[in-house]
Amino acid sequence: MDSLIAAAARALAAGDPLAALNRVALRDDAPALALRGIAMAQLGDLSRAQALLRRARRAFGPNEAVARARCVVAEAEIALASRDPGWPARALQAARATLEEHGDRANAAYARYLEVRRLLLNGRLDEAERALGRLDAASLPSPSRAVHELVRAGIAMRRLRTTAMRAALARAGRAAREARIPALMAEVDCASLALRTPAARRIARGEERLLLLEEVEALLGSRALVVDACRHVVRDGRTLIPLARRPVLFALARALGEAWPGDVPRDRLVARAFGAKLADESHRVRLRVEVGRLRAALRTLAGVSATAHGFVLAPRRAREVVVLAPPVEGEHAAVVALLSDGESWSSSALALALGASQRTVQRALDSLAAAGTVQARGRGRARRWMTSPVPGFTTALLLPLPLPSD
């Protein structure tokens, strides 16, 4: 390794891409191409970075397996940052195995972190947690330790474990300061904002207020009967009734929860559950059927009693009924939640993360674009969608999370 390559590598490790480019910008040998690609990625030109890294990987000789594997890891990181679902997962696993075989523990660990972050992005928390548990960050350099703790904080946030999240972010901050990489310190600060911004709305007895993540955690651990509109479940302490696949029943449960301790007129329930502006006899018959199904689903937590005007929710153990609602709502709230991370997404990546068809996601994006909520850049396969984060809110509770089946 010549002196210019070594100096450029040190500049990139310190988070100074401009200094690195000053040393290798005019060179086209394989190591210089790789360093230029990483520098362009740090500067935000991801498409150019991918092209340079691809050229570098092809330029390395057959005896330079470690260098080619490092290029694959860098390409995978760029694909993750650009929310590309077609990134080479198997190639990344092969690259990680090559790095481990040749003793490059730091880059092998980073490849594992990329795999974990992809699992986290897709809501596969159990797999992400198991993969993270196989990594020992104590012996890794400080940048890798910071990434390890950021991933751990992300898992804790999605599981609503705010104490664990706060501790992981504190460790990530210490490691980032040791690394002296401004971009890494900024990432830790950005992740910490989720603890200080409203994450949900609490609706009870006709009143509504915003909750922080730790307040949401406290509410879900209380003895209240919670109609959770973020996860589409009804819960009482540790007992959880999933209704994500039964939208009519959940709409009825939420309407009853918002009105508790009062009742809800039948016409209003018909409008909430079926979207009918005028209720006729067929709607009332269907309402009785669906209320019966809701009564059966919630029998361990609450009863649903008929009144002179409608129906009322009657909790069995809880003394209070609370509706937990997202900070932002609407037909396409889940799409907005994913886009609110500030990154650019393809429609196929959004479909993969949400578990929906690409056509459904495309219709949602068209509606949001017409309303000015999101914007697109690029054309064809290079088309990406993005929006600015919703100011003053964290949409962590809207992100994909696997729930128990009904």
Image (tube, rainbow, N blue to C red):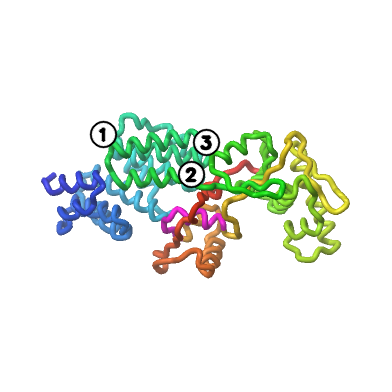
Who is closer to the viewer here, 223 or 71? 223
Q: Are marks 1 and 3 in contact (CB under 8 Å)?
A: no
Total numbered labels: 3
Residue bearing the label numbered 1: 103
Q: Residues within 10 Å of mark 3 (few under 14, many from 20)?
A: some
Residue 347 position, x and y percent, is 48, 61
Residue 379 position, x and y percent, is 40, 69
Q: Is tag 1's residue or tag 3's residue first in the polypeptide sequence?
A: 1
Q: Which residues are magenta?
A: 333-346
Helix, strand or loop at mark 1? loop
Residue occupying the point 40% across, 35% down = 170
Q: Is residue 221 left or right of residue 370?
A: right
The amino acid type found where label 1 is placed reads Gly
Residue bearing the label numbered 3: 161
Who is closer to the viewer here, 246 or 95? 246
Q: Are marks 1 and 2 in contact (CB under 8 Å)?
A: no
